[in-house]
């Protein structure tokens, strides 16, 4: 066990105490901060000094931040904790029911909410005003989500906008979800007491025992079999918040008995393809996703959808796509590689499976249009195009799988492409 020398801290001990409280706020916000990092932070501050606020910020960030997505949360907690005279008023305003008016950056807004909850703890939230002035300069709409049950509100909440407590509750709800599927008829048959089809082979074989006399007709009925479920999940930077929740859902489906799937195969891709099927077989979801994250080295990195699908079609297509497999492709479709290769690989994937269902979190926007070149290349070759940003959208997957004619948003988006093709490179990049 490592030992650290005594640090020459101020006599009043306020700096060490404040850094400790700051570390607790980071831990409540979701960052993996333990006592060891607090000691490292004290040593780093003692070595670097804290005469400048910028140096102090970067010193603590180097100690407490270990993943790129944690930087936004750290910056918000730091801004609200260290010497911001209005941080309490800002936090209390963040704890009010949401006021829908100005569109803000979604990642920063979610980080501010988590920082406010971590610093306020169980402090009472201020009550919203009973009425808004009629002669105000701007008319806003108050979100009345408090009138609904917490679970009903959580079902429709965007994964990226959830606080730490809401994420934990959403994971518990996802663990209860199932994805049932109907069995498929097989070309093989099995004996039946009565049926529309006569089993001539069994009938003639039975007649041989009676000297060729047919005493009764034997019947047969088709056997049924369960299809495979294949999940291809994008874990690039733009999909990180959604892919974690989707993988919790996939883990629940893979470990729930009696819902029909023969096998569940899961793959992640960012800049390369990774098979995480065996990791999801672990009963504990945290251990399963931890091992899967260690296997997938390209988490929160870039996106190469076309190259990743090429690797899947080449190395895994014939192994897992037989027996009428259903493929769930979870990605936003924002790919900077050759759109021609992407279209070819998605078409090949579509021809190799029974149904190809594309789950895209960007469909949460009402005015979504397929301007990105990657989305336009993939759209014609999928059977169904659905949103995947909330628990309710994942629950609706059962309908998409059960109904063979369910295409989701695909027909509407194809009409948009036909009306305004966005053929120029500038128009294609505008959709990104």
Image (spheres, rainbow, N blue to C red):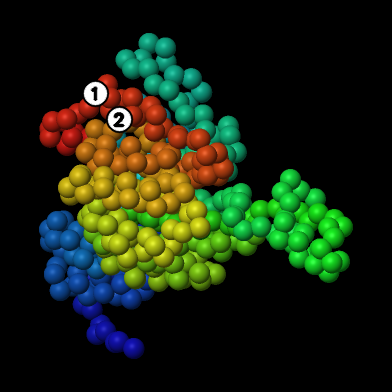
- Residue 26, by quadrant, is bottom left
Give the number of the disc on residue 319: none
Residue wearing tag 1: 420
Mark 1 lies on a secondary structure that is loop
Foreground pick, 90 / 374: 374
Say whether residue 107 is left or right of residue 186: left
x, y (%) of residue 7?
A: 23, 79
How many marks the image carries: the answer is: 2
Q: CA distance from mark 1 to mark 2?
A: 10 Å
Mark 2 lies on a secondary structure that is loop
x, y (%) of residue 225?
A: 60, 57
Say whether residue 145 is left or right of residue 225: left
Q: Earlier in the sequence, mark 1 or mark 2?
A: 2
Residue at image coords 26%, 45%: 343
Estimate how packed mark 2 is, as few (under 14), some (14 to 19) or many (20 or more) residues with alpha carbons within 10 Å. some
Foreground pick, 211 / 233: 211
Foreground pick, 222 / 251: 222
Residue 152 visible to an observer of this rendering: yes
Residue at image coords 59%, 55%: 187
């Amino acid at each position: 066990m490592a030992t650290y020398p005594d640090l020459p801290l101020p006599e009043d001990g306020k700096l060490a105490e404040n850094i400790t409280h700051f570390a607790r706020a980071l831990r409540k916000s979701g960052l993996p901060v333990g006592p060891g990092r607090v000691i490292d932070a004290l040593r780093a501050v003692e070595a670097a000094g804290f005469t400048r606020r910028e140096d102090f910020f970067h010193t603590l960030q180097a100690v407490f931040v270990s993943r790129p997505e944690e930087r936004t949360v750290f910056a918000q907690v730091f801004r609200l904790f260290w010497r911001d005279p209005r941080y309490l008023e800002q936090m209390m305003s963040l704890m009010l029911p949401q006021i829908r008016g100005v569109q803000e950056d979604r990642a920063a807004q979610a980080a501010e909410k988590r920082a406010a909850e971590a610093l306020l703890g169980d402090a009472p939230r201020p009550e919203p005003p009973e009425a808004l002035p009629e002669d105000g300069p701007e008319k806003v709409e108050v979100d009345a989500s408090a009138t609904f049950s917490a679970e009903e509100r959580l079902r429709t909440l965007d994964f990226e906008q959830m606080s730490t407590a809401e994420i934990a509750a959403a994971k518990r709800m996802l663990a209860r979800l199932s994805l049932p599927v109907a069995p498929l008829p097989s070309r093989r048959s099995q004996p039946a007491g009565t049926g529309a089809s006569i089993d001539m082979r069994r009938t003639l074989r039975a007649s041989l025992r009676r000297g060729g006399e047919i005493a009764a007709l034997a019947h047969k009925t088709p056997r049924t079999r369960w299809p495979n479920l294949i999940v291809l999940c994008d874990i690039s930077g733009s999909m990180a918040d959604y892919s974690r929740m989707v993988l919790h859902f996939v883990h629940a489906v893979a470990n729930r008995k009696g819902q029909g799937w023969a096998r569940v195969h899961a793959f992640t891709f960012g800049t390369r393809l990774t098979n995480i099927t065996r990791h999801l077989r672990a009963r504990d979801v945290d251990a399963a996703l931890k091992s899967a994250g260690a296997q997938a080295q390209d988490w929160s990195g870039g996106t190469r959808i076309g190259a990743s699908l090429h690797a899947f079609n080449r190395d895994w297509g014939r192994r897992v796509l037989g027996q009428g497999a259903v493929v769930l492709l979870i990605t936003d479709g924002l790919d900077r590689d050759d759109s021609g290769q992407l279209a070819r690989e998605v078409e090949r994937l579509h021809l190799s499976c029974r149904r190809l269902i594309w789950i895209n979190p960007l469909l949460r926007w009402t005015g979504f249009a397929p301007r990105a070149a990657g989305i336009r290349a993939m759209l014609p070759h999928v059977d169904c195009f659905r949103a995947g940003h909330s628990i309710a959208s994942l629950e609706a997957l059962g309908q998409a799988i059960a109904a063979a004619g369910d295409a989701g948003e695909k027909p509407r988006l194809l009409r948009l492409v036909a009306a305004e093709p966005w053929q120029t490179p500038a128009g294609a990049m505008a959709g990104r």
